[in-house]
Amino acid sequence: MTPEQRPGNQLTDAAEVLRRVVPLGKDKNGLPARDAFMPDIVPAPTKSAFMPGSDGTMSTHQECMSARDAYEEYVKVGDRAAIGTWGVSVGECTELELSVYHDGLKRHPMLPAGEVLPATHVSVWFPSKTNEVSNSRLRRQRERIAKDLCDFAIDRDYLYIPAS
Amino acid sequence: MGRMVTGTVRSTVGTKAARSIQKAREDWEVALTTRLQTLTQLKAGWSGAESQPLNAASAEHFRAFLVHVPQARANDAYPVLTDEGYVRLEWQSHGHAYSAEIGPNSLYMCDLAPEAVDDSDVELDWYDQDRLVEFFLSGSKGDQ
């Protein structure tokens, strides 16, 4: 998907801190694991552990949603459990050459037909697969980006963790 | 007589130290297996809609791997769950950020160096515990 085809509006306010909820499975002794900042898995029958989806995005929420509300919205779905909410800024994403799109109320491949993303949803777009980039290199790039995002988030400290 | 007492004291102290070390190892092994049990309880959709529960073979590989983990590296072996349902390890050493993903029939090892240009990784389409142990203990991924 080319940048022009990405749904939503690109965010440019470098100071806006996006909300990323960290699930229990990606807890590393009370802090987010780097894996918590990898692109979300998307349905793809041929996808393997080493074949990232061609359009990798990481789900976050706009700053206008409180970190607590982001957490509450996350854990109310199914049996989800999370350790809290951390943040990365639009400026930090831009520094890593990631584009950030507010795509709330838009459709998404992960959602059932007819459903749309939450109003405050923001997608952080990771590098896509191209003919020039091997799967191995793409995977490595994403590992590097996830590490840098995680470092930013940990340096900022958590935005919200539940009292219990 | 005095030497016997001293020897007995040394022996007692040595036994207590050995017990203490053994107890410490048991404690962190319990902590890691408790964490693994927590991951086992996560159901499909635990992260995103497509996220998978812990793969049983991956968990078994991880349990077998724990035998080779020195007590001083216990924190590095704290398991994380990937969206694919695989056990993932993350640790840092000497400016490098390492990760390994244990699949049922696969192993991914990544070394993020202080300079991105030196980053490297290896993907195996089979699981190789010896390679994982070597990577975990020395940072060496071996040959493809």
Image: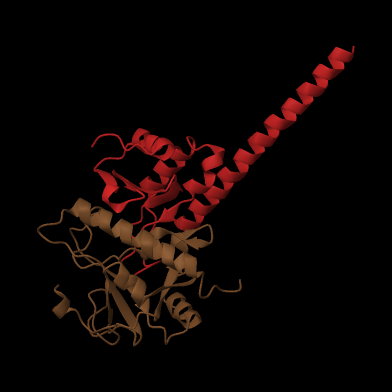
Chain colours: A brown, B red
Q: Kindly identify the residue that appears in the image at 25 percent across and 34 percent down.
A: B143
> Quadrant of residue B52 in the image?
bottom left
Q: In the figure, is residue B81 to the left or right of A55?
A: right
Q: As rendered, which of B84 and B12 lies closer to the eye?
A: B12
Residue A132: x and y in percent read 11, 57
Quarter the C terminus of chain A occupies: bottom right
Q: Is residue A59 above or below residue A33?
A: below
Q: Can residue B63 be seen in this view?
A: yes
Q: Kindly identify the residue that appears in the image at 38 percent across and 65 percent down.
A: A149
Residue A91: x and y in percent read 35, 75
Residue B47: x and y in percent read 39, 67
Q: Kindly identify the residue that appears in the image at 64 percent across and 40 percent down.
A: B24
Q: Can residue A58 be seen in this view?
A: no
Q: In the figure, is residue B6 to the left or right of B117?
A: right
Q: In the figure, is residue A150 to the left or right of B121?
A: right
Q: Kindly identify the residue that appears in the image at 49 percent across and 36 percent down.
A: B67
